[in-house]
């Protein structure tokens, strides 16, 4: 299956990057290479580094960027390892970074990857298929309390407690192996009148995927390193797709802009912590009406941009 991924807010992201022909740029969530292609097409003597933990993304992006092999280096890893991975390449600073935190259309639409509630397929959801933990392990091995906290905190589902209870009851009868089984369990846990607002499994599937791939921990851990990687004037552009991610990015950018830890009542700063840069987007950039018509999956996207001093 062809690796497809609609590059959300592509024009806006490229504009905010302020690409220089001789600059060094990093895409930490390479995907199908949509943002990457636009960056590479603007480079002359500069260089592009693309990171993705999905082997299918690395292969697809390599094909898409074949015309730019003289200015492209692709690395299979998680973006939280970007700093170390670039240091191995002799790179200490970059002029721009892109993170598109959305699940790719390829991952959602490839049945055997087990990301989507639209298919009946093995419970997997691993973005990096080298890792051991799968969605099946979470559903069958986590305690009821752990499942409740994941579904409540990562899925923000009102019925988290009942869904966790139904999962545990169902797996006592037989192991939960497929997305189809899980769908039916979730459906039974949610009152019929409440199933009108979108697919009943959407929030739980999101929660399990986030847990399986440690998405929020990775984002929290990576942001300080990514900001540190930026050269003066360099920009970090991050596209999020739900409030949990957006809150982490917003908080990290705000802290980097104003790191002072002095109590508010202090007349002057004594902690001596200096700003690392400034937030370029005071409010998040949202997809245009035209983009929403073209790609409904863009609906929840938000772009935030930080510039290094």
Image (cartoon, rainbow, N blue to C red):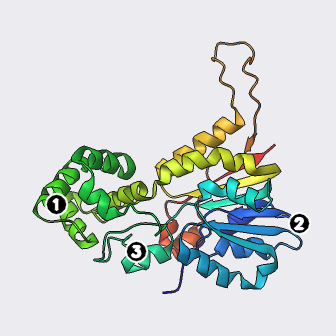
From what the image shows, is residue 79 above or below residue 10? above
Residue in the image at 73% along x and 46% along y: 228
**Element on which disc 3 rests:** helix
Residue in the image at 21% along x and 66% along y: 176
Q: Please indicate whether residue 26 sits to the left or right of residue 7 in the image.
A: right
Viewer-nearest of labels 2 and 3? 3
Q: Quadrant of residue 111?
A: bottom left
Task: State yes or no: discs 2 and 1 in contact (Cβ < 8 Å).
Answer: no
Chain-order first, disc 1 or disc 3: 3
**Element on which disc 1 rests:** helix
Task: State yes or no: discs 1 and 3 in contact (Cβ < 8 Å).
Answer: no
Chain-order first, disc 2 or disc 1: 2
- Residue 107 position in % (x across, y down): 46, 74
Within 10 angstroms of label 1, few (less than 14), some, or many (20 or more) residues? some
- Residue 252 position in % (x across, y down): 61, 41
Residue in the image at 85% along x and 68% along y: 46
Q: Quadrant of residue 110?
A: bottom left
- Residue 48 position in % (x across, y down): 76, 68
From what the image shows, is residue 18 above or below residue 146? below
Nearer to us in this view, 259 or 48: 48
- Give the residue number, with chain letter if any, for mark 2: 22
- Give the residue number, with chain letter if any, for mark 3: 113
Residue 191 in sight from this viewpoint: no
From what the image shows, is residue 115 above or below residue 161? below
Chain-order first, disc 2 or disc 3: 2
- Residue 80 position in % (x across, y down): 60, 54
Q: Specify the farthest residue to the left.
A: 173
Residue in the image at 49% along x and 50% along y: 216
């Amino acid at each position: 299956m062809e690796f497809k991924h609609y590059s959300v807010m592509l024009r806006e992201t490229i504009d905010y990057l302020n690409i220089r022909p001789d600059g060094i740029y990093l895409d930490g969530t390479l995907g199908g290479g949509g943002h990457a292609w636009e960056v590479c097409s603007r480079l002359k003597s500069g260089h592009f580094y693309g990171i993705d933990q999905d082997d299918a993304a690395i292969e697809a992006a390599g094909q898409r960027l074949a015309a730019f092999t003289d200015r492209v280096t692709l690395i299979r890893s998680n973006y939280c390892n970007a700093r170390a991975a670039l240091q191995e390449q002799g790179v200490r600073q970059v002029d721009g970074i892109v993170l598109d935190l959305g699940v790719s259309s390829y991952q959602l639409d490839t049945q055997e990857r087990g990301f989507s509630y639209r298919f009946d397929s093995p419970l997997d959801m691993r973005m990096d298929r080298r890792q051991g933990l799968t969605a099946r392990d979470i559903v069958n091995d986590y305690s009821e309390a752990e499942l409740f906290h994941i579904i409540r905190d990562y899925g923000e589902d009102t019925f988290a407690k009942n869904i966790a209870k139904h999962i545990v009851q169902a797996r006592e009868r037989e192991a939960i192996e497929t997305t189809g089984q899980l769908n039916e369990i979730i459906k039974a846990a949610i009152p019929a009148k409440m199933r009108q607002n979108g697919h009943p499994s959407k929030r739980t599937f999101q929660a399990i995927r986030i847990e399986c791939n440690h998405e929020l921990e990775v984002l929290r851990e990576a942001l300080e390193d990514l900001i540190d990687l930026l050269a003066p004037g360099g920009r970090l552009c991050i596209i999020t797709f739900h409030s949990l991610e957006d809150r982490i990015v917003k908080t990290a950018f705000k802290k980097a802009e104003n790191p002072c830890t002095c109590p508010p009542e202090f007349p002057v700063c004594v902690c001596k912590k200096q700003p690392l840069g400034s937030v370029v987007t005071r409010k998040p950039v949202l997809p245009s009406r035209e983009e929403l018509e073209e790609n409904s999956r863009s609906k929840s996207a938000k772009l935030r941009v930080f510039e290094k001093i």
